[in-house]
Amino acid sequence: MLDQNPNFVLSVEGLTVSFDGFKAVDDLSFYVEPNECRVIIGPNGAGKTTVLDLICGRTMATSGSVNFKGQELLSMREDQIVHAGVGRKFQTPSVYEDLTVFENLELSYPHGYSVFGALTFRRNDAVRSRIKEIAKTIFLEALLDEKAAFLSHGQKQWLEIGMLLIQDPELLMLDEPVAGMSVAERKKTAELLNTIIKDRSVIVIEHDMGFVADIATRVTVLHQGKTLSEGSMERVQNDPKVIEVYLGH
Ligand code: ADP
Ligand code: MG
């Protein structure tokens, strides 16, 4: 157990990854508090997705530390990191199209690592009520028996968020969750994020500044793998460095 400031759920320090000598993430440090929604913005190629890949164990860091509630994530495997309470959503939704909303959520319900887990798993009342609760949170309560194939792109994104929420992660990471969504769906997604941070921390990568303003506790502006600016939305929006490299375009 490393020393960990109890005010932080996640402490990223000196995080670096080098791909053939190119540092996609370069000595990056940032700290996430409980119930915080941290938004990472920055130009294409800034290293945003790579930061999430490093935290969730998909990409091996070259150096640095990622401390999650006292555990060093950089020495853990991807499945161990999920088990420790870190959920990650990728850019494209990956739901099971042929299964219903209910079944997609049920499949994601944590039932341990037992070999017989999937076979002995029963739809008991606790599971059902949890699925209904999650479905309500993600605005799909009325569509529980609908096949995922019939959902809109936005509804599929919400379903995938629900599939992560049902595992009750303490840290949820979302890569461009509102890309391709309608304005109305974006508003509802902001509402969804503001609900779910009551019980966890969230890291979101996003480009839509209106959406960022609706959800961000703090914003980190990434540029060439480093922090260019960090703070409230208002602070980073008015930072001349940010205006020059990013918002000014
Ligand atoms: P962003 O999400 O901010 O648009 P990325 O994190 O996807 O940026 O990529 C940052 C940089 O790292 C890009 O130049 C990209 O080409 C490079 N990169 C990302 N992953 C790899 C990899 N596995 N191998 C080599 N280069 C990579
Ligand atoms: Mg990206």
Image: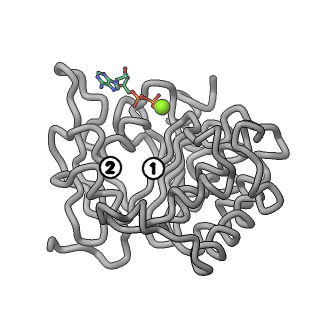
Q: Residue at x 64, y 53 (%)?
A: 234
Percent from the top left, x then y, of residue 96?
A: 58, 41
Front-lying residue, 125 or 56? 125
Would you identify the image quadrant in which residue 136 lies? bottom right
Residue found at the far front of this picture: 119
Local secondary structure at mark 1: strand
- CB at disc 2 and ligand 1 closer than 8 Å: no
* Camera sees residue 235: yes
Callouts 2 and 1 close, C-beta under 8 Å = yes
Tell me the quarter of the picture where residue 114 sits.
bottom left
Q: Residues within 10 Å of mark 1 (few under 14, many from 20)?
A: many
Residue at x 30%, y 35% (from the top left corner): 25
Q: Is 146 placed above or below 59 here?
A: below
Binning the other alpha carbons within 10 Å of mark 2 as few (below 14), some (14 to 19) or many (20 upward) gives many
Asked whether, in this view, residue 182 is left or right of residue 209, the answer is right
Badge 2 marks a residue whose secondary structure is helix
Residue found at x 39% / y 44%: 52
Determine whether 70 is above or below 18 in the image. Answer: below
| Whole-percent x, y for residue 1 in the image | 14, 74
Of the residues under marks 2 and 1, which one precedes in the sequence?
2
Query: Residue 133 or 211: which is nearer the viewer?
Result: 133
Q: Which residue is drawn at 43% across and 25% down?
A: 45
103 or 205, nearer to the observer = 103
Q: Which amino acid does label 2 sit on?
A: Ile
User: Residue 122: horizontal and vertical position, in percent?
Assistant: 52, 71
Left or right relative to 228: residue 1: left
Q: Name the residue under label 1.
A: 88
From the viewer's perspective, is residue 94 above or below residue 214? above
Q: How far apart are marks 2 and 1 (CA)?
A: 9 Å
* Marks 2, 1: nearer the viewer: 1
